[in-house]
Image: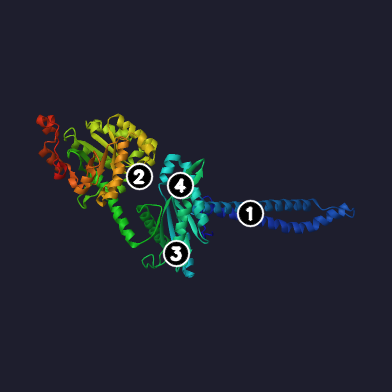
Amino acid sequence: MGVTTRNMAISGIVKGPTGARAARRDIVALGIAASAILMFIGTGSVVLPAILRQTLGMGSGPGQVLTTALLLNIALIVFGWRRYTEMLRAIARHRSAEEQARILAETDPLTGCLNRRSIGVATDELLETADNDQQAVAFIMVDLDDFKQINDMNGHKLGDEVLRTVADRLSALAPEGGLVARLGGDEFSCVVPYDAKAPSQVDDLALLLIDKVAEPVKIDGLVFEITMSVGLASSDPVYNGNMDGIDADTLMHHADIAMYHAKKKGKNRYFWFEGTMEEELRFRNELEAGIRLALNDHEFVPYYEQQIDLETGNLMGFEMLARWESPRLGVVSPTVFIPIAEEIGVIGELSDQLLEKALEDAKGWAPHLTMSVNISPVQLRDPWFSQKLLKMLVQHSFPPQRLDVEITESCLHENVAVVRSIITSLRNQGVRISLDDFGTGYSSLAQLRTLPFDRLKIDRSFVSELNDGKTGSQLVDAIVSLGNGLNLPMTAEGIENQEILDALREMGQLKGQGFLYGRPENSEAVNRRLAQAGLLSQAEEADGADKADNTVRNPFGKAATG
């Protein structure tokens, strides 16, 4: 594919005063050579016939002065010619250096594609040409999904090979007249002209790119499967909000916003740019800034959802849930800020702040009450996570037997070896480990048998199906039977009405949690209720009779007392 580029000034090429002096020397040398040739013609016309007559014995030879003059002319001609050829070679070297420098300035050295600097210029030229031909231009922004993991787990050398393969595939699929660029990292772009009356051509190309790039990449005996998120933007007014005079920077910006939207919607897909996406991105950026400020101001606080023994109705403990008490936004759900915190790399700091507060809160509860905490998949990529958590327990003098760490099924497939090491290290110190959202991932029976879990949590999506009667009951009953077969106790989450509670009670001994027992509450509300029920540690010390009969009351709602 052809790309129109511009000549650029390159450092290292002779120019300015030094270049002018060299040019003057070259002109002088050429003038000397030209003069020497003219003198050679004049002198030679006299000397050479004389030499010829002398050789034939028909007369005397030329004089000493003329002979010397002829030799000097010849020397001057040789000097001038050599200087001229050196000048031509120098010009050739300079031109080659210029071309090489231009290539380095305009292309990505790893893949050979255009780079971010040159794609803008080339896109503007393509826009101008397309406008004259009554065509539109589509900017296709491509970002590889989770590419960082390939680099982290296999090294940058293999990562570079994957990037080269992706670039080759994109270039092979780009239509005639299209442009392919690597913008940096694992981000690429493809810019193509198309018939504005047939925008489906761009949709077809986007689907083809997603499909072909996702084909397995085999390098050094390893197989990599890559997906990518794609954003589309067009110079066609129908797609850009009737903007006039749209340029390359605007197209790139719109395509980048659409690509981010594709990532947010699940990755491995594409979206056309829409104006509402820009508003969403602006709000996202405000949230990012707000999260960073909230960390500094300690606005993230733990809330607690009670966990009940469904058979007896006794309170067994709490699950710690994150909340953001924002002065501007109010109480923000973790479904809003946790994914963003993971993406911007502050989930570890956020979790540490929450756990520090939660451990201090839980120290005031009755000693039999446990606390469950959810661990982000991002945290489980840290091989030192277990040591950090255990150190925190020691610092707060919190018994590890009262802590239950919940890990989602998706974590098991990112790095089983690291997860296994973390689980084993924590369990060896008495921390309990639960597999959260059981049934929504891809856990195999082999993993459940070999990984040392203490408990399984049935995902709320399955529990809610108990409202549907027999079909939902059979599904949850099968999950409970599996847990019993593995000798793993189970917790059902999402208990929101009496019908679900009654159905679960018939399935055996389970723990449960859900809105039927009340909404999650902050530490002050929980402590007030526990104090009224005599379930704070100080109250238990003062009331030995309640501890002796081992009766645990549930102060959080009538459903747990039945």
User: Tag 4's secondary structure?
Assistant: loop
As measured in the structure, the alpha-carbon distance from the residue carrying label 4 to the one carrying label 1 is 52 Å
Locate residue 273, reporting x and y percent: 37, 60
For the residues marked 4 and 3, what is the alpha-carbon distance in whole angstroms? 27 Å
In the rendered image of this protein, does residue 301 appear above or below residue 270? Answer: above
| Labels 4 and 2 touching (C-beta < 8 A) | no
Say few, some or many: other residues with alpha carbon within 10 Å of mark 3 (under 14 / 14 to 19 / 20 or more): few
Residue type at mark 4 is: Glu
- Residue under numbered circle 4: 225
User: Which residue corresponds to mark 3?
Assistant: 200
Q: Quadrant of the N terminus?
A: bottom right
Contact flag, marks 3 and 2 (Cβ < 8 Å): no
Mark closest to the chain's N terminus, 3 or 2: 3
Q: How far apart in space, not on screen, are marks 3 and 2 (Cα)? A: 35 Å
The amino acid pointed to by label 1 is Leu
Amino acid type of the residue that numbered disc 3 sits on in the rendered structure: Ser
Distance (Cα) linking label 2 and label 1: 70 Å
Q: Is residue 120 left or right of residue 311?
A: right
Left or right position of 483 against 255: left
| Residue assigned mark 2 | 441
Name the residue located 40 percent from the left edge and 47 percent from the top edge: 146
Q: Quadrant of the C terminus?
A: top left
Q: Is residue 108 visible?
A: no
Residue 482 position by quadrant: top left
Residue at which label 1 appears: 88
Residue 255: tell me if it is visible. yes
Q: How many marks?
A: 4
- Residue 337, label in figure: none
Q: Are marks 1 and 3 in contact (CB under 8 Å)?
A: no
Say which element carries label 1. Answer: helix
